[in-house]
Every structure is written in structure tokens, then in C-alpha cells.
Amino acid sequence: MLRKQSSETDPADWFHTAADRLRSADCLWDADGLTLSGLELLQQAIERYLKGYLIAKGWSLAKTHDLGKLLKEACQHDPTFGQFKKLSVELTRDYFAQHYPGGDWTDIGENYESLRQQAGELVEPIKQSVPWHFP
């Protein structure tokens, strides 16, 4: 773990926290399979990767958990992010369903393995676009 003051304007800090959450989601999946915490960690990882990417492109932070909104912003810089619209819709839906009791848990996480694969695919163009922010 890094011991430093983080900054919401430093893309590397967003990517560091994103990678941490993605590793944690993978550990939970390996240990317990589908969990509510694992879903939240996966969504939070993608949220942070997108926010880091957008901040690297000059975007001013908007505090949102809606991956669709973040993806729309990312598409303004690189239209190929549009291929992840389904991921953003499903993962945002699952996130809010599990995050606040009262949501419909009937189908959450039903496509977790596919969501995780797509999450990995979404991270690659971010790493290629701003490689200097990754160790």
C-alpha cells in the first residue's frame, strides 16, 4: 500500500485504487464466488478507471457512480468505448441494486464472469492511452 497523500486530480491515484478494487473483486470471486461485495468492488474498479482516464484527459471530477455517464464522457475522447455500453448499464444496475437495501436482487450478478471479462477489456485502451500513469 502506498503511504502518501492522494489527490483526486491525479489519474495515477485513481488507477491505483481501481487496480486495488479489481484485485479484491477477483480474490472474493476466487474464494466465495458471487458476492454483493464483489459486485460493488467490480463496479467501483471500473468507475475509478474511467474517472482516472477522464481526469487524464482534462475532465473535472463529477461525483457519480453511474458508469453510463462516465462512459459517455469517455466516448467523447475515444468512440471505441461505446462498445462497453452494455457493461456500464448492467454493472451500474447491479451496483445500485446491491448498494441500497430495497433493490431487486433477483438477477444481480447473473453475468458476473462476462462483466469481469469486459471490465478487463475496458481497462486495456485506458492503459494504452495514458501508459505513463501506470507502473
Image (cartoon, rainbow, N blue to C red):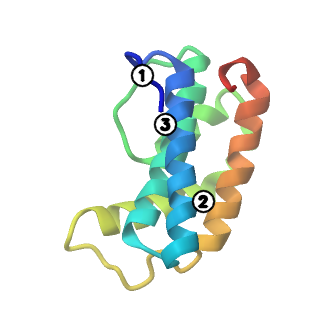
Q: CA distance from mark 3 to mark 2?
A: 20 Å
Residue 3's label in the rendered image is 1
Is residue 93 shown to the viewer in this render?
Answer: no
Q: Amino acid at mark 3?
A: Thr
Dot 2 or dot 1, earlier in sequence: 1
Label 2 close to label 1 by CB (< 8 Å):
no
Residue 30's label in the rendered image is none
Residue tagged 2: 87
Residue 101 in which image quadrant: bottom left
Q: Quadrant of the C terminus?
A: top right
SS at circle 3 = helix
Left/right of residue 97 with respect to residue 109 in the rendered view:
left
Residue at image x 47%, y 26%?
2
Residue at image x 54%, y 63%?
27
Vertical arrangement, residue 36 with respect to residue 56, above or below: below
Vertical arrangement, residue 42 with respect to residue 71, above or below: below
